[in-house]
Amino acid sequence: MEYDLIKDRFGSLLDSYPRCLPILFGILDLLFLRTWYVHRVLRKLKLGPGARLLDAGTGFGQYAWHVLRKYSGVSVTGIDIKKDYLERADRCFRVFGLSDRVELLVDDVTKPQVKGAFDCILAVDILEHIEADEVAISHFSQRLLPGGRLIISTPSDQGGSDVKADGQSSFIGEHVRDGYNLGELTRKLERAGLEIEESHYSYGPIGSAAWRMLIKIPLLLLGRSLLLMPLVALYYIPVLPLGLLMNAMDLYRDNDAGTGLIVVARRET
C-alpha cells in the first residue's frame, strides 16, 4: 500500500483550510501508538525555553505542532523532502501565530543543509524509508549539542511493517527495509558516537492488535477511495474505545518483544 498517496489525498483536502490541519494532528495523535510513545519521551526530557528541536521528516508538521504548543520557548526546525507538505504546515503555523518559533526547510537527511546545533532531534518513522540510514544517523549525531538526544521510532524486525514471514512484502510500499533488529540499530548509533539512553519495544501483542484495528483496516479502505470516509467513521464508533484502551495498555507494559522500537540516544561530547 502506498501510504504517501493517502496522505496526499488528505492534504489536498486541507489546502484551503489551514485552521483544520490541527484536527488531523489530533486524530493522528489519538490513533497512532507511536505518537503516545514519542510524547512520553518528550515529557521526560522537559525541553525548556531556548531549546532547539529538529523534526526530521516533519511531513505535515504533526510533531512540530505538538512541541510548539506544549513547550513554551522551544524553537523547531522541520525538514522534509516534500515542499508541498512544508508549505501546508507553514500556512497552518502562520494562521495560529507560531511562525516566529518554527523554520521549515526542504532538506534531505542524508545530505542536509540545515545549520546549527540542536538539543533534541526527532526521527519518527523515517529511518525505514532511507537506504543510507547510517549516513543520516551520522548527520544527526553531528547536529546534536553535547548532552542532546536523538529520539527514534521505527519498525522492528519482529513483524514491523506488518511483515510476518520471509518473502512477505511490507504493508507500507515506501519502506526500504521492513524493520530493525535492536542490536543492529544500537551498533549503528554507537558507531555514530551516540550512547543509548533508553531502548525498548513498542507495539507488543496488544499494541499490534490495536494497530490492525485502528490503522490497518481503515487505511485499506481509504486506500481504495476517500469516498469511503463515512464508512470508516461508522467503523470507529464501536472500535475506537477498545483500540485506545489497548494502546494505553501497550504503553504501560514492559514488552519483551514488539513490532516497533523506541530508542533514545545521547551525544556525550
Image (cartoon, rainbow, N blue to C red):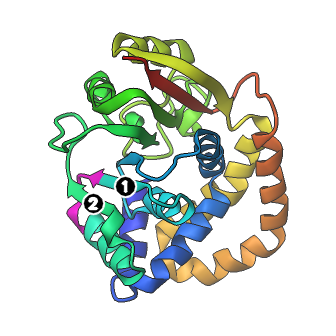
* Mark 2 nearby-residue class (10 Å; few <14, some 14–19, many ≥20): some
Is 34 inside the magenta-drawn segment?
A: no
Quick check: marks 2 and 1 in contact, CB under 8 Å?
yes
Q: Is residue 217 in sight in this rendering?
A: no
The residues bearing labels 2 and 1 have C-alpha atoms spaced at a distance of 6 Å
The residue located at (48%, 39%) in the rendering is: 170
Relative to 238, 113 lies left or right: left
Q: Residue furthest front?
A: 49
The residue located at (57%, 79%) in the rendering is: 228
Residue 33 location, x and y as percent?
A: 66, 49
Q: Quadrant of residue 245?
A: bottom right
Compared to 258, does 22 lie above or below?
below
The residue located at (60%, 51%) in the rendering is: 35
Compared to 87, does 157 lie above or below?
above
* Number of numbered discs overlaid on the protein picture: 2
Point out the stretch of residues depicted in magenta.
79-84
Quadrant of the rendering where the C terminus is positioned: top left
Q: Which residue is mark 2?
A: 103
- Determine whether the residue tagged by mark 2 lies in a helix, strand or loop: strand
Q: Is residue 74 in sight in this rendering?
A: yes
Q: Which residue is mark 1?
A: 76
Relative to 26, 250 lies left or right: right
The residue located at (47%, 64%) in the rendering is: 65
Label whose residue precedes the other's in the sequence (2 or 1): 1
Residue 256 location, x and y as percent?
A: 76, 22
Residue 89 location, x and y as percent?
A: 35, 70
Compared to 244, does 224 lie above or below?
below
Please name the amino acid that badge 1 sits on.
Val
* Mark 1 nearby-residue class (10 Å; few <14, some 14–19, many ≥20): many
Compared to 137, does 195 lie above or below?
above
